[in-house]
Image (cartoon, coloured by chain):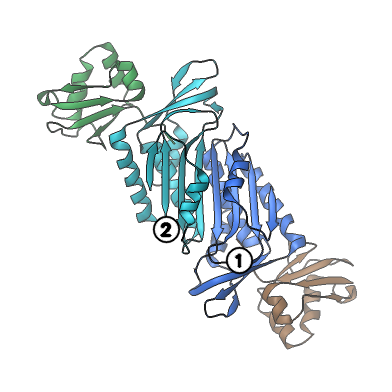
Chain colours: A green, B brown, C cyan, D blue
Amino acid sequence: MIRVLFFAQLRETLGSAGTEVPHDESATVADLKAFLMSKGDSWQQAFSNGKVLCAVNQTMVQDDEKLCDSDEVAFFPPVTGG
Amino acid sequence: MIRVLFFAQLRETLGSAGTEVPHDESATVADLKAFLMSKGDSWQQAFSNGKVLCAVNQTMVQDDEKLCDSDEVAFFPPVTGG
Amino acid sequence: MIKVQESDFCVAEEYAAMTRGNTKAGAVVFFVGLVRDFNQNKKVNALTLEHYPAMTEQVLQDIVQQARSRWSLDRVRLIHRVGRLTLNEQIVFVAVSSQHREDAFAAAQFLMDILKTQAPFWKKEETEKGDEHWVDANNKDTISAQRWL
Amino acid sequence: MIKVQESDFCVAEEYAAMTRGNTKAGAVVFFVGLVRDFNQNKKVNALTLEHYPAMTEQVLQDIVQQARSRWSLDRVRLIHRVGRLTLNEQIVFVAVSSQHREDAFAAAQFLMDILKTQAPFWKKEETEKGDEHWVDANNKDTISAQRWL
């Protein structure tokens, strides 16, 4: 399983702080996104604006990043700390 | 009279914190410098290395600056504060 | 020294820790970010900072390492608060000491610019009218960060 | 607020004065310059700062005015000490607050760079061997100042 986390307005929009997705649905970050977007309209919208960032095991990655079983994948909007 | 002040190593080299020079010997800063350089070897040396800065009435000026009677003219090396 | 914490920090103590027993560093540069009353044209009363705990310290460590490899630095301290903060409260502290002020200034700016665009913190503001909204990422911050890349 | 003084200053008090009752400024940048143990390849124990009293505050006021005309600044504090200072003592303090950190960082650097090349202060160092010498003006400082001109 891939452990998936959502932060900030993405978490609020989806009404979810995280979920688990089978590894065979998510060979890459792009696959995982496609899987999540199939879960409903709010999911479709949240991931289609191109602004969502992704970190795999706490490191920023692009959509073509390959995923391994038990990876932690986080999706979040552009950061606004400091 | 022109009131002349010396600071830092210039003051130490000349053995003087200041002096007064008649205005008719010092129509410009360059004139005043020439007059001071005539006062002896250490004066000659101190003003001939081209590094001495000049302020008239507390404002930095160049050698062609005209002087008025009772101006305060300060000579000093490049600054090193901060 | 890197900390992510809910509690406030004391600039005086942090400054003391930068300079105590330190005779090498001729220059210390600090930055403090505070909750200000206006942001993106809205009057702000408070904000809540969320972060991604497993990732945050890792990113901050990495940013500090990058700064140390670019400039000759002595001590570096970085504190970022999370949770709810009201008007005029301290959000972030960055301090850098170095032999030369140019290095200390450059590194402090680098740390803030990269932190603002790469560290996983998010701000939600409360306006004086009582509504809440997530802060949009700032284009100015992206530009400030790009000069280091 | 500009001061030239023999006595030490307290960074904590100065910081409090920058932020007290101030809800506009989201960014505060400080610089502290300290007596460090090495300068121009000599081991330093202490230094004495001489200045040209009638001119110093005038120049500092002018530098602060220039900074205010270049950037959007909130509060500015500048303290420079004179007299004899020993190892690790504080020499100079610059603090700038602003709505935006870019302005605060730029102004603080500008103030230090211009102060270092235009304010009439001179340093005489005492080495550990007991001899004294006047510090030479630093080419690096001239270059740092030129980027603002």
Residue D134 locus on image (x, y percent): 61, 74
SS under mark 1: strand
Helix, strand or loop under label 2: loop
Q: Position of residue D96 (x, y in %)?
A: 59, 45
Distance from label 1 to label 2 (Cα)?
22 Å
Co-location on one chain, circles 1 and 2: no
Which one is closest to the eye, mark 1 or mark 2?
1
Mark 2 is surrounded, within 10 Å at the Cα level, by few (under 14), some (14 to 19) or many (20 or more) other residues, namely: many
Disc 1 crowd, CA 10 A, few/some/many (<14, 14-19, 20+) = many
Q: Farthest residue in the bottom direction?
A: B41
Is D133 or B77 nearer to us in this picture?
A: D133
Front-lying residue, C146 or D52: D52
Examine the rendered structure and indicate whether residue B52 appears above or below residue A62: below
Compared to residue C114, the image places residue D3 above or below, namely below
Q: Which residue is mark 2?
A: C74
User: Quick one: quadrant of the C terminus of chain B?
Assistant: bottom right
